Amino acid sequence: MRTETLTTVFTDIKGYTAATSAQTHQENARMLRRIERLIAPVVRAYNGRVIKSIGDAYMIVFRSPTEAVRCATAVQDRLHQYNTNTRADQGIHIRISINVGEVRVHRGDVFGEPVNIAARIEAVTPADEIYFSHAVYLTMNRSDIALERVGEYEFKGIPELVTVYRVKRYAHTQAEEGAPPPSDGTQAAGLPFGGTQLDHWRKMRWLRRAYVTAWGLAVAGMLGAGYLRYRPRADYGSVVAAAKAAVEQGRAVDVLGLAGQIPVEATEERALIRRYRRAAVSALLETQRYDTAAVEIDALLREDGRDAEALLLRGVLRAKRGGSLKEALEDVQQALKLQPRLGDRDDVVDLVVAGYGEGATRRLADGLVADVLGQRAVPALKRTLGEGGGEREARNSMAARLQRLGAGEDIDWVPLAIDDLRSTSCKTRKAAISRLVGAGDERAVGPLLKLGEAKGCGASQAAKAAESILKK
């Protein structure tokens, strides 16, 4: 694995998940093709290389930070022109984030902290904006691009504060008042970033088109149109096969790199490789490579927000990272609604049962056991209850659920009832006293006498219960 200093760019579409949820597969495919036609030619003109194209999102690298920023302004200006000439509900609004640094390059993919920082910056970038790091600011040519500082951000997994800048929108309209626009038409007042880089791309496009046309005719003459049509699908099929082999050999990161080689229009192959991408994420979670797993899970869900296994993986990730258990269980709940068979997995059952341990998630966990998991949760509930840990309310909830599932015959109710004697609820105390009297177990005598001496709610009943047990 070699290292190289590259500029990493992330793009992401505002509202993509919400839009795709209301689309058919054909409408979504058409939208993705439209996005690629708008963005990909500009990226190529500025010598960018697409590393991954996952749904609406692109991960691109450039050798020059200046070229990356110029390309970003051209892309945003082109999308602005597209949006002004189409219906509002079909507009495309993207956010672009940029960082530069030494990355690891392996099998067509790039990794490292500079990539993670670029991804973190993307998360705080508003739609239609271009945000970038202080490293880009220091290394790029700033002479012809208006920039301004946004502020400092603290990103998870990044030990230092990251200073973020942005390319100023409509800076060309803030020049000296009354100054006429350039006569060569390179700056258009209606474009957010002035149109200079977009104009440069247009000039280069004609040269590129002439070259591509000539080359295409030559290749078509030599190989035939049929071969050109079907060759890509065979190539992508080999990529899917390579991803399968990588999963079997435990090379999770290689799977993600291979997935990035399949373009958005190869919908069949992209659907096939999703299972290997999810398997790769599971392997990353097992080896605690949480940052890489998080990036790929986000990509899977941007591509298909109803991917049950991806939702489940996000829940597992949140739990493993020590995040919100409530959010983790909500992901699991959504996943199980889409695919109840996922409840057969041991890690899902363990995660749900862990929800009994917190008051904020206890009802949600119990509902999942009652409505989805059923008997599959019995071994985990018994094991957790037998370990004796957790709050009294958690143990009681698990015991009650086991009884409703017809699996309460092995439960030792005496310790649970003794715990209930400490409850602040008078009703709970009295119910516990009745249960202890019925059990007649001498382990309850001491706690009952202690409650009887306290002179509080249930004190007299507790004293009588202790005497009744001793007489047996």
Image (spheres, rainbow, N blue to C red):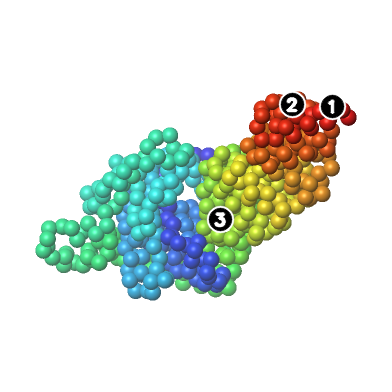
Give how far across and how far down residue 114 sits, in percent. 43, 42
Q: Which residue is drawn at 69% across and 54% down?
A: 342
Which amino acid type is marked by label 3?
Leu
Decide if residue 363 is on the left or right side of residue 378.
left
Q: Distance between the residues labelled 1 and 3?
A: 64 Å
Q: Residue at x 66, y 39 (%)?
A: 426
Assign a secondary structure to mark 3: helix
Label 1 packing within 10 angstroms: few (<14), some (14-19), many (20+): few
Which amino acid type is marked by label 1?
Leu
Q: Distance between the residues labelled 2 and 3?
A: 60 Å
Assign a secondary structure to mark 2: helix
Whether residue 395 is visible here, answered yes or no, is no
Compared to residue 38, the image places residue 6 above or below, namely: above
Give how far across and how far down residue 250 sits, in percent. 66, 43
The residue carrying mark 3 is: 300
Give how far across and how far down residue 416 sits, in percent. 74, 36
The residue carrying mark 1 is: 470
